[in-house]
Image: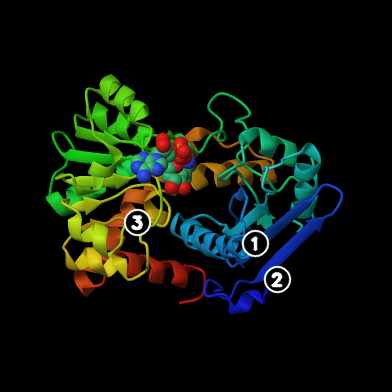
Amino acid sequence: MTAFWTEPDFDDHEVVHVVRDRNSGLMAIIALHSTHLGPGAGGTRFWHYPDPKDGLRDALRLSRGMSYKNAMAGLPMGGGKAVILADEARTKTPELLAAFGDAVEGLGGRYVTAEDVGISEADMVAVSKRTSHVSGLPAPGEGSAGGDPGPFTAIGIYQGIKAAVRHKLGKDSVQGVHIAVQGTGSVGGGVARLLAKDGAKLTLADIHADRAAALAEELGAKAVAADEIMTLPCDVLSPNALGAILDEDSIAKLDTAIVAGGANNQLARAHHGKTLFDRGILFAPDYVINAGGIISVATEYLARRDGVSAGVEEVHQRIANIPERLEEIWSKSDETGTPPDVVADRMAQELIGRG
Ligand code: NAD
């Protein structure tokens, strides 16, 4: 392993743990970017990296993202992320998950884990047998916080899109507003359903064309091919599939007033926020608008840790701050002529004591 502090993604991370358990074959990296606001919270990614350095980069980049996301969501949590370096066959055994649980427990609560790519709710239940510093577990009962974070992420994005439409287009409703949704999975599908109820004009796309077509049929929307959605004339483009979709080339071809969606790390490079800004396109920084899921996960964890019960109402109240936070960012951006992503990064850095 090379010295991680020479990596371009190293950003004064407090600590980076390399975990090895020979018996189970576990090889993992747990990166804690900042615990200034509380325990570093962020999911575990289970992925096969042909070059383990890419796993380290993911852990560094994603843990920093969680510091910013948790801070901007007003949560008493810092930023952390775990990456399990899966073998080529992606072998995931109970022993491996148990060893990972032991590693999390060994950090004594400085890191709180949950699901991410490649890790299911059932996996987290297995991890929870070895550590209490885990979240994203099934909700303990009707009306309690917990369970799949996807629907909560979708609610925050829906509210963020309405705030963007108000700010940029001066409209109090999305009725008749044309919104192009890229990705109709857990998040994008949820966003589309909520917008449809408000009478938005929807165009949907997914690389699984049948998925987009079925949802379009259900909602009375239109489906287009996945390669058409980024250039479609619309009022709002809502990316809810992959990261790094906004670069020089794609931004030049956008025909929208607003980009507001849940995909993580939409800007291919940091300076692409300015490219959007210079084109007069309003951008909702992704880690602000997509915080509904972590708000649910954190509310669930904090309640369990403190031995109190948390209802889903509490989650909704916290999510309701997302549009306010976005409005604050856009207002500062308008006043100072600074791209919204730069404003958001500065606010987050301030909040984690690195301003
Ligand atoms: P998902 O796997 O349920 O859905 C993603 C969908 O995008 C799939 O239907 C997939 O076929 C589609 N897709 C992939 N590439 C595409 C492309 N090029 N064009 C069109 N569609 C494409 O995942 P999800 O949970 O809905 O997450 C979507 C995004 O939101 C991801 O970037 C994820 O990191 C981010 N996110 C999710 C959550 C959450 O709570 N699930 C929270 C924060 C951020």
Image position, residue 87 (x, y; %): 70, 49
Colouring scheme, one of rainbow, by chain, secondary structure, one colour: rainbow
At 17% from the left and 50% from the top, the residue drawn is 256
Q: Amino acid at mark 3?
A: Arg
Q: Quadrant of ligand 1?
A: top left
Q: Residue lying farthest bottom?
A: 6
Give the quadrant of the N terminus.
bottom right
Image position, residue 102 (x, y; %): 80, 50
Q: Amino acid at mark 1?
A: Pro
Residue bearing mark 3: 325
* Element marked by disc 2: loop
Q: Nearer the viewer, mark 3 or mark 1?
A: 1
Residue bearing mark 2: 1
At 32% from the left and 25% from the top, the residue drawn is 215
* Element marked by disc 3: helix
Q: Mark 3 or 2 closer to N-term?
A: 2
Q: Amino acid at mark 2?
A: Met
Number of the label disc, if any, that sits on residue 52: 1
Q: Residue lying farthest top?
A: 218
CA gap, disc 1 and disc 2: 8 Å
Q: Mark 3 or 1 closer to N-term?
A: 1
Image position, residue 106 (x, y; %): 80, 56
Give the quadrant of the C terminus.
bottom left
Picture quadrant where residue 272 is located: bottom left
Residue 264 placement, left or right of 182: right
Q: Nearer the viewer, residue 83 or 105?
A: 83
Given contact means CB atoms under 8 Å apart, are the residues at marks 1 and 2 in contact? yes
